[in-house]
Amino acid sequence: MGEEIKDFSQLKLNSWLLAQCESMGLKKPTPIQQNCIPQVLAGKDCIGCAKTGSGKTLAFALPILQKLCEDPYGIFALILTPTRELAFQIADQFAAIGKAINLKKCVIVGGMDMIVQGLELSKHPHIVVATPGRLADHLDSCDTFSLQKIQFLVLDEADRLLGGHFDAQLKKIFAALPKQKQVLFFSATMTDALEKVQHLASDKVFTWQEEDDAG
Ligand code: ADP
Ligand code: MG
């Protein structure tokens, strides 16, 4: 067992990220953050499972923002999530942390104007948070943006995304991504679907699952 991490400064995050966490009142990284952030910073693919409310969003947002600062070119990260509501929540957390670097983010979900979204996509956002159906619609209809510079693919609520309902859209999206990228899966439960995703990740995938009783 590694030594226990007591505060964010032990995670090798840049000082601007630490300052941002502090200003948001975040004191100690949650277990999934303690375990996954160093691995993501080290370039590993990651499968992280912990119950709802355990801080999975920052477990991927913090290391992605750190890497983004090193090489901010093209759409840098794509975060897929099953619902509109989750997409907005994730985008809000990226915006809160990323305001220090003028983060440009874009939310691509159903029920909003396709043309407006297409324009936003063409303006080179750093981060795209999307539901699979609407992003697949844009890939069908629009050639003003490219996902070829993506360095991170995140599947948030991966068990729900990979449960079958989104298969056709995900296939289309994955085909539009570069081969070389880090893939991060986060989920509340480790289901069969999630166990089957190992093939989407590389063989250096780091898997971390919260114990039922952390006590
Ligand atoms: P999950 O995706 O695991 O369900 P979220 O990432 O949405 O959980 O986080 C739930 C809440 O916990 C959010 O309001 C978030 O700001 C807060 N949070 C995240 N990390 C920490 C932390 N290290 N300390 C305190 N609160 C945190
Ligand atoms: Mg979440």
Image: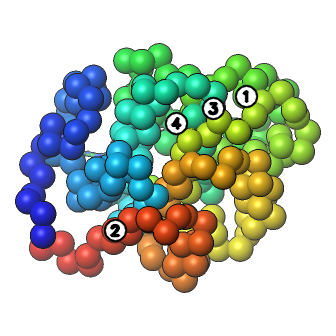
The amino acid type, in three-letter code, at marker 4 is: Ala
Left or right of 60: which side holds 213? left
Q: Which callout, 1 or 2, points at the residue further toward the start of the chain?
A: 1
Q: Residues within 10 Å of mark 2 (few under 14, many from 20)?
A: some
Q: CA distance from mark 1 to mark 2?
A: 33 Å
Kindly check if marks 1 and 4 are in contact, taking CB atoms under 8 A apart as contact. no
The image shows residue 88 at horizontal and vertical percentages of: 55, 39
Q: Residue furthest bottom?
A: 192
Rendered location of residue 114, percent (x, y): 83, 33
- The residue mark sitting in front, 1 or 4, is 1
User: Does the closest atom of ligand 2 sit within 8 Å of the Cβ of label 3?
Assistant: no
Structural distance between the alpha carbons of marks 2 and 4:
24 Å
Look at mark 3 in the image and give the residue it sits on: 75
Q: Secondary structure at mark 2?
A: strand
Dot 4: within a 10 Å radius of its alpha carbon, few (fewer than 14), some, or many (20 or more) residues? many
Residue pictured at 33% horizontal, 54% vertical: 39
Residue type at mark 1 is Leu
Of label 1 and label 4, which has the lower sequence position?
4
Tag 1 and tag 3, C-beta contact below 8 Å: yes
* Mark 1 and mark 3: Cα distance apart in space: 9 Å
Residue topped by disc 4: 91
Tell which tag, 1 or 3, sits nearer the viewer: 3
The image quadrant where one finds the N terminus is bottom left
Q: Which residue is mark 1?
A: 121
Checking the image for residue 1, the label placed there is: none
In the picture, measured across the screen, residue 141 lies left or right of residue 108, that is right
Q: CA distance from mark 1 to mark 4?
A: 15 Å
Asked which secondary structure carries label 4, the reply is helix
Question: Which of marks 3 and 1 precedes in the sequence?
Answer: 3
